[in-house]
Image: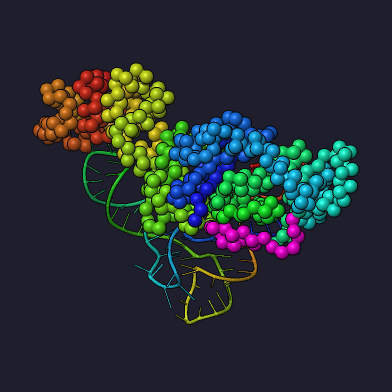
RNA sequence: GCCGCUAUCGUCUAACGGUUAGGACACGGGGUUCUCAAUCCUGUAAUAGGAGUUCGAUUCUCCUUAGCGGUACCA
């Protein structure tokens, strides 16, 4: 088989969203699985909506996800090869060729005219289709109109008999009657080429072997096949992957909540977790595994195992998978990941990173098994860093409920750590023994000490907390309630 | 409206035409435990409806229904 070459071709009209990321991921996995190339191309022919900011965000998102491209912006001596607005002469040359071969023609119908006809057809409940009238113009008539300065678009003639068959790797054969298609516009009046045209020209010129994209492009495909044929290009393989859906089962979009990849980064999701989850939306492995690294996905991925129906985005499952990946981090990795969140929420300062790194690391690790998203670290561990907090409601209840014993509990606890320090095994052993002697039950003294040290009723093991705090911090907090 | 796609637990999904229809998330119960979490065990829960082909349909065919996508001089 020839070298596999696939591409992801976003238009820089907004941030990279979850659906686009999933399409990019499937392309990436397919390329890497087959030792092929993954190409990034910027489809910026919509010059009204395309922006550099969007483009930068898309590239940043892809890098963050680990979807690095082999060819594309920043990967060759000449980036302009990968921006469609810088490839205009190429499209114009192909369009001219089609016109000279009479496979395409200039159409002088105005947008207003056509819109009117479309509205009328709609009102009469008919399907609107351009009748191809300008294609019937003689050369002289067309020249006359052009010389008169009439603006025109260029359309490719579409055979009106027979059918077009798409051989789709995930959907099998999809058949469309040619009579439902009208002549395809490939150049606007301002000479900018249209998506259906550039995509074909670029995919051919870039040697794309497999076109993997969302199902929303399936109905464009017959048009593109006609353009391939008119141009005399070899056809790539198509694979239309199912859409990602929102809670109402329509295509995932902004109104369903966060869809920007970078927002997931900000909210504390790990790129490997997002990749893992996204891979499972529409694709499934040949066994029951659910947790995968990128490397494992690359080795297992196959288009043949891509599902046909749309998949609803389930944040709960993403959170679960994120939690699994967080638990897989070592102490330093996790600390490095959490620090930005602690900083942002003001729980720690830049100075703390230098002066108290080990303390931060201990605090973070104690929350590791509980973290679903990194952003939760601040709320969970703020009492490790802030001394001026109040007991929360549940903690107050514990405090009040144990009014009779609490004084004694704190007295014994402070006596012990004063005598033997805060080593967790030693403190636990000694505390349990002394409390038994004093006739105080574990549930009571544990809970009391916990609320005094942390101000809350939940958290890591009590002796982990006291050991991490150290003697001074423990005593300071006990004093506050004595 | 027209064209196309799709249809298995609430969700993501598995199942050469023969399975007690499997797994995961979520949810419920229990074990462990100083709390929460993690972890282990465990429970509830699905083949849209109707014909046909077949000894036998989740699986193949057709119809219906529903949902989605497209229907731009957007991509």
Q: Is residue A77 left or right of residue A117?
A: left
Q: Is residue A311 magenta?
A: no
A114 shown above or below B17: above
**Residue depicted at x 81% and y 54%:** A131
Q: Does residue A318 appear in this view?
A: no
Q: Position of residue B38 (x, y in %)?
A: 31, 44
Q: Is residue A419 left or right of residue A50?
A: left
Nearer to us in this view, B57 or A436: B57
A73 shown above or below A240: above
Task: Say which quarter of the image contains residue A358.
Answer: top left
Nearer to us in this view, A113 or A309: A113
Q: Is residue A448 left or right of residue A372?
A: left
**Residue depicted at x 62% and y 50%:** A217
Q: Is residue A166 magenta?
A: yes
**Residue depicted at x 64% and y 52%:** A233
A386 shown above or below A312: above
Q: How many marks?
A: 0
Q: Which residues are magenta?
A: A158-176
Nearer to us in this view, A43 or B32: A43
Q: Does residue A308 appear in this view?
A: yes
């Amino acid at each position: 088989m020839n070298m596999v070459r696939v591409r992801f071709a976003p238009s820089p009209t907004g941030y990279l969203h979850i659906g686009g990321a999933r399409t990019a991921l499937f392309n990436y996995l397919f390329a890497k699985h087959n030792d092929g190339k993954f190409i990034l191309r910027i489809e910026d022919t919509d010059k009204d909506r395309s922006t550099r900011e969007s483009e930068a965000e898309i590239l940043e998102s892809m890098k963050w996800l680990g979807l690095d491209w082999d060819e594309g912006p920043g990967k060759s001596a000449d980036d302009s090869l990968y921006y469609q607005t810088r490839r205009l002469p190429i499209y114009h040359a192909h369009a001219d060729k089609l016109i000279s071969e009479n496979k395409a023609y200039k159409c002088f119908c105005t947008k207003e005219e056509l819109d009117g006809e479309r509205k009328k057809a709609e009102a009469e409940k008919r399907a609107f289709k351009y009748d191809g009238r300008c294609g019937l113009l003689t050369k002289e008539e067309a020249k006359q109109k052009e010389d008169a300065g009439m603006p025109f678009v260029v359309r490719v003639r579409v055979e009106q008999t027979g059918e077009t068959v798409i051989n789709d790797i995930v959907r099998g054969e999809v058949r469309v009657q040619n009579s439902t298609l009208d002549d395809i516009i490939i150049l606007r009046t301002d000479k900018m080429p249209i998506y259906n045209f550039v995509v074909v020209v670029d995919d051919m010129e870039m040697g794309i072997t497999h076109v993997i994209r969302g199902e929303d492009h399936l109905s464009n495909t017959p048009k593109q096949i006609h353009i391939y044929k008119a141009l005399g290009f070899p056809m790539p393989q198509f694979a239309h992957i199912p859409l990602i859906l929102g809670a109402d089962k329509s295509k995932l979009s902004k109104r369903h909540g966060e869809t920007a990849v970078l927002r997931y980064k900000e909210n504390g999701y790990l790129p490997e977790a997002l990749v893992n989850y996204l891979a499972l939306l529409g694709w499934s492995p040949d066994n029951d595994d659910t947790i995968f690294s990128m490397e494992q996905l690359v080795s297992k991925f196959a288009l043949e195992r891509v599902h046909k129906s749309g998949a609803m985005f389930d944040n709960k499952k993403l959170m679960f998978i994120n939690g699994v990946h967080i638990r897989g981090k070592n102490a330093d990795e996790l600390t490095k990941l959490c620090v930005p969140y602690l900083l942002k929420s003001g729980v720690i300062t830049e100075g703390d990173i230098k002066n108290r790194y080990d303390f931060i690391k201990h605090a973070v690790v104690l929350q590791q098994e509980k973290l679903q998203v990194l952003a939760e670290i601040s709320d969970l561990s703020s009492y490790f860093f802030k001394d001026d907090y109040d007991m929360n409601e549940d903690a107050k209840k514990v405090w009040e409920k144990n009014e009779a014993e609490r004084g004694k509990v704190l007295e014994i606890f402070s006596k012990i750590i004063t005598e033997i320090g805060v080593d967790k095994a030693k403190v636990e052993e000694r505390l349990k023994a002394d409390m038994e002697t004093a006739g105080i039950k574990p549930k009571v003294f544990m809970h009391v000490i916990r609320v005094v040290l942390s101000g809350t009723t939940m958290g890591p093991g009590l002796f982990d907390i006291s050991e991490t705090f150290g003697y001074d911090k423990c005593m300071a907090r006990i004093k506050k309630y004595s």
